[in-house]
Image (tube, rainbow, N blue to C red):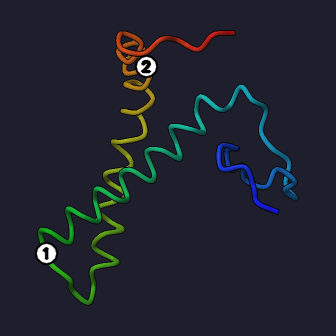
Amino acid sequence: MMSNPKKPVMLNSSSTFKKLPARYMAVVMPLILSSMMSAIVSLISTVKSLGLQPDLLGIWLGAWLISWIVAFPTVLIVLPIARRFALLFVQPPQP
C-alpha cells in the first residue's frame, strides 16, 4: 500500500514525556530554530576559517555557544518583524 505523497510527515506524537502547553510554542520554536541555524552557520564558518583540524569539534562548540547566545534573543525579537514583512508578499492563512 502506497502512502499519500501530499500528506505531511508528522513526528510520532505518542511520546513518553509530557508536552508543554501550546502557548510555549512562541519560545520553543525560536529556541530550536536558533540552535540549528547557529550550529550550521558556525560550523561552516569555523571550517572555512581554520580548515579541518583535530580539535575542530571543541573549537566549533565554543563558536556555536557564542553564536547561539546571540542568535536566540535575536530570533525572539526579529521573528515577529519578519512575519509582518512576509505578510507583505504572502496572503495570511484563512481561519
Left or right, 39 with reference to 17: left
x, y percent for residue 49? 11, 68
Q: Viewer-proximal residue, 39 or 84?
A: 84
x, y percent for residue 34? 43, 45
x, y percent for residue 52? 20, 83
Tag on residue 83?
Answer: 2
Whether 77 is drawn above or below 70: the answer is above
Query: Callout 1, which amino acid?
Result: Leu
Tag on residue 16?
Answer: none
Residue, disc 1: 50
- Cα gap from disc 1 to disc 2, whole angstroms: 36 Å
Left or right, 30 with reference to 12: left
Left or right, 61 with reference to 21: left
Secondary structure under the numbered disc 1 in the rendered image: helix
Where's the N terminus, which quadrant?
bottom right
Q: Viewer-proximal residue, 7 or 43?
A: 7
Name the residue: 58% across, 14% down: 93
Q: Viewer-proximal residue, 2 or 8?
A: 2
Whether 41 is drawn above or below 88: the answer is below
The local crowd at label 1, few if under 14, some if 14 to 19, many if 20 or more residues have their Cα within 10 Å, is: few
